[in-house]
């Protein structure tokens, strides 16, 4: 029965901190809520009050986890500079390079951070250097190459936080921006590697002395206990606050959309706008963030 399946999935999610397979069930809170509301309507029409009550309790639990994304944070009055940042997992297999270049033209970000950048993708992105002369990149033959482009003067380097996978690090005009891509946690080893990288990102963020942003494909949703740890230990805030669920993957199948592409930030940064961009051939939607700092 569908209600029993949702109960089992939610129970498994409770073990997500310790077991990679259980953590997969943390990510579908919006789907659980939608399913419970549909079941509740059916139970109400059938006058099955006990089952309706069970649905209501479970729906309320999921709603309490989802609704914080719709509540704006307290405004930060200390903000003098403005920047627009684009984060996108281009998907290594995606051949629609022109769509990504058009997206950059349309969005016109100050900084654009890309992941899954292999040598083919890097060649396709080279035209951006006409407007974004500062480039930080480390291509790879697998899905973990990275590249970042800035039109603002900056210093940049490739850093390895919590493992062997590269992240881009740019420091510009008083702002630190990291673009990163931990591995998908689809085995016990990958689960550990991803968590190590998220912990190291938190340590890095907490050690910074000024406004800091970390973005990219984190391969976890806000309902993962590891994402909660990242925010707490890194003294970070989720840029989704006040802008809704902001699901970004898988772009080709809306019923399973979940928010695994993120932008988290330190204190001293105000998010004026956060949007999910249109599909550009990738299995991920882009994340576009306008900030003041």
Image: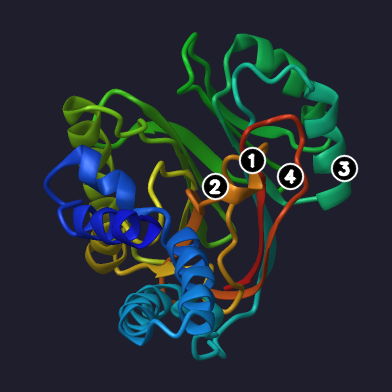
The picture quadrant where one finds residue 2 is bottom left
Residue beneath label 2, please?
256
Residue at 59% across, 81% down: 79
Q: Residue furthest left?
A: 18
Residue at 53% across, 41% down: 155
Residue beneath label 3, please?
105
In this view, the residue in front, 149 or 42, is 42
**SS at mark 1 in the image:** loop
Which-is-in-front pick, marks 1 and 3?
1
**Whether label 4 touches label 3, CB < 8 Å:** no
**Whether label 2 touches label 1, CB < 8 Å:** yes
Asked if 125 appears above or below 132 in the picture, the reply is above
Q: CA distance from mark 4 to mark 3?
A: 13 Å
The picture quadrant where one finds residue 244 is bottom right
Residue at 53% across, 87% down: 76
Which of disc 3 and disc 4 is earlier in sequence? 3
Residue beneath label 1, please?
253
* Residue 251 x/y as whole percent: 65, 41
Which of disc 4 and disc 1 is earlier in sequence? 4
Which of disc 3 and disc 2 is earlier in sequence? 3
Q: CA distance from mark 4 to mark 2?
A: 35 Å
**SS at mark 3 in the image:** helix
Asked if 212 appears above or below 36 in the picture, the reply is above
**Whether label 2 touches label 3, CB < 8 Å:** no
Which-is-in-front pick, marks 4 and 2?
2
């Amino acid at each position: 029965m569908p209600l029993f399946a949702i109960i089992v999935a939610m129970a498994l999610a409770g073990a997500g901190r310790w077991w990679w397979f259980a953590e997969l069930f943390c990510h579908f809170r919006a789907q659980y809520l939608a399913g419970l509301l549909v079941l509740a309507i059916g139970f109400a029409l059938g006058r099955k009050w006990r089952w309706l009550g069970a649905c209501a309790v479970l729906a309320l639990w999921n709603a309490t986890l989802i609704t914080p994304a719709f509540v704006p944070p307290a405004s930060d009055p200390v903000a003098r500079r403005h920047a627009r940042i684009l984060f996108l997992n281009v998907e290594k297999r995606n051949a629609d390079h022109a769509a990504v270049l058009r997206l950059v033209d349309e969005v016109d970000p100050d900084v654009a951070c890309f992941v899954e950048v292999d040598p083919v993708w890097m060649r396709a992105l080279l035209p951006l250097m006409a407007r974004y002369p500062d480039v930080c990149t480390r291509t790879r033959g697998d899905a973990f190459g990275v590249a970042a482009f800035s039109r603002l003067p900056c210093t940049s380097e490739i850093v390895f936080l919590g493992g062997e996978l590269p992240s881009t690090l740019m420091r510009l005009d008083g702002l630190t921006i990291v673009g990163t891509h931990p591995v998908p946690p689809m085995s016990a080893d990958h689960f550990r590697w991803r968590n190590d990288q998220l912990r190291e990102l938190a340590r890095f963020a907490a050690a910074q002395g000024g406004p800091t942003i970390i973005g990219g494909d984190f391969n976890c949703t806000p309902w993962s206990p590891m994402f909660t740890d990242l925010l707490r230990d890194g003294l970070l805030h989720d840029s989704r606050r006040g802008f809704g669920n902001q699901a970004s993957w898988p772009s080709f199948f809306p019923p399973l959309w979940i928010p695994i592409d993120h932008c988290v930030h330190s204190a001293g940064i105000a998010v004026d706008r956060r949007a999910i961009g249109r599909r550009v051939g990738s299995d991920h939607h882009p994340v576009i963030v306008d900030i003041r700092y």
